[in-house]
Image (cartoon, rainbow, N blue to C red):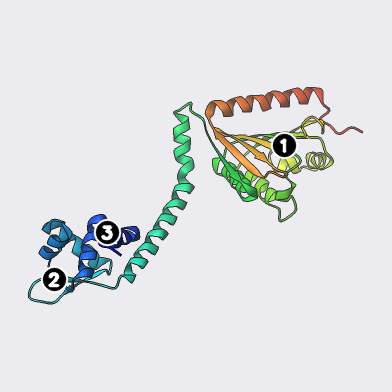
């Protein structure tokens, strides 16, 4: 393996090009002064002093006790440790950016008409969107589908926990839902009121799609259940406002044209 390949390995582990040059020079020789490092690596003498100090901090070099200040290379296994630490830092940064991206997105779209969209696949992705609704802490306008059963509605179900937290956060949901027995039960036994769920019924065959639509803040979430489990979230004040108006109009229409009290 030639010198350039060795330098590349050191760089991949996390060293700068200058640090890698000096470290490989140390590996090739027994001991070097900063002046000798400069001669072999092509770096300036002043830079080699700071590079040698950094290599000592990374356990890649040690300062020797001789009449002249010299350095020698330590075991290259320290490069693996450096690479592993670098990977952990990148992973932590990725998590941090992901957790805080919403604030940047909100600021961007609050001052821009340019819509943005991202799609998340799978049940875990859908749950992530529901958690985003809780984080937004804004009222929700909902077009409901009956295909969300995979998330569970029992005592340990994700949906029940989501609805409970949603109500605890003071979020009101203005919903348009198909007319089915379970929904009627919730409307009559006080569950809807407890959950801050303002429900308007529509005929059970009026909307049979497997996609739920949620409008919250400056976002529109289209959540697909069934064979395709995914969620697409559009971030745009104008699109969110348009979809909110559409759901409001549909709620007003069905409130007037479809019986909201259960037929006897």
Q: Where is residue 144 in the image (x, y as percent from the top left)?
A: 72, 36
* Residue 116 position (above or below residue 132): above
Specify few, some or many for label 3: CA neighbours under 10 Å numbering under 14, 14-19, or 20 or more. few
* Residue 62 position (above or below residue 180): below
Which mark sits nearer the N-terminus, 2 or 3?
A: 3
The quadrant of the image that shows the C terminus is: top right
The residue indicated by pointer 3 is: 4
Q: How far apart are marks 1 and 2 (CA)?
A: 73 Å
Which mark sits nearer the N-terminus, 1 or 2?
A: 2
Q: Which residue lies furthest to the front in this view?
A: 1
User: Which one is nearer the viewer's eye here, 166 or 147?
Assistant: 147
The quadrant of the image that shows the N terminus is: bottom left
Q: Where is residue 160 in the image (x, y as percent from the top left)?
A: 70, 49
In the figure, is residue 141 to the left or right of 112?
A: right
In the figure, is residue 32 to the left or right of 135?
A: left
Which mark sits nearer the N-terminus, 3 or 1?
A: 3
User: Which one is nearer the viewer's eye here, 197 or 100?
Assistant: 100
The residue indicated by pointer 1 is: 144
Q: Residue at x 27, y 59 (%)?
A: 4
User: Which one is nearer the viewer's eye here, 186 or 135?
Assistant: 135
* Residue 85 position (above or below residue 211): below
Mark 1 vs mark 2, foreground winner is 2
Do the numbered discs 1 and 2 sit on residues whose CB atoms are within 8 Å?
A: no
Mark 1: which secondary structure?
Answer: loop
Mark 2: which secondary structure?
Answer: strand
Q: Where is residue 233 in the image (x, y as percent from the top left)?
A: 58, 37
Specify few, some or many for label 2: CA neighbours under 10 Å numbering under 14, 14-19, or 20 or more. some
Mark 3: which secondary structure?
Answer: helix
Mark 3 vs mark 1, foreground winner is 3
The residue indicated by pointer 2 is: 70
Q: Position of residue 210 (x, y in %)?
A: 73, 38
Do the numbered discs 2 and 3 sit on residues whose CB atoms are within 8 Å?
A: no
């Amino acid at each position: 393996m030639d010198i350039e390949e060795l330098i590349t390995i050191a760089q991949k582990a996390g060293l700068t090009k200058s640090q890698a040059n000096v470290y490989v020079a140390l590996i090739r020789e027994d001991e070097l002064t900063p002046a000798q490092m400069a001669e072999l690596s092509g770096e300036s003498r002043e830079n080699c002093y700071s590079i040698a100090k950094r290599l000592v901090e990374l356990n890649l070099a040690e300062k020797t006790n001789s009449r002249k200040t010299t350095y020698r290379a330590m075991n290259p296994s320290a490069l693996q440790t450096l690479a592993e630490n670098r990977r952990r830092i990148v992973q932590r940064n990725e998590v941090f950016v992901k957790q805080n991206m919403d604030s940047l997105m909100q600021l961007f779209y609050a001052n821009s008409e340019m819509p943005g969209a991202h799609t998340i696949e799978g049940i875990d992705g859908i749950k992530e969107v529901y958690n985003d609704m809780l984080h937004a802490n804004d009222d929700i306008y909902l077009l409901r589908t009956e295909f969300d059963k995979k998330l569970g509605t029992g005592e340990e179900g994700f949906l029940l926990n989501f609805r409970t937290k949603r109500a605890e956060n003071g979020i009101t949901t203005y919903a348009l839902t198909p007319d089915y027995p379970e929904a009627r039960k919730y409307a009559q036994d006080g569950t809807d009121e407890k959950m801050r769920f303002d429900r308007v019924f529509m005929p059970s065959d009026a909307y049979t799609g497997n996609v739920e639509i949620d409008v919250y803040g400056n976002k529109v979430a289209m959540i697909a259940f069934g064979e395709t489990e995914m969620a697409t979230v559009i971030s745009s004040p104008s699109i969110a406002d348009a979809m909110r108006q559409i759901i409001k109009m549909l709620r007003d229409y069905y409130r007037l044209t479809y019986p909201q009290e259960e037929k006897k």
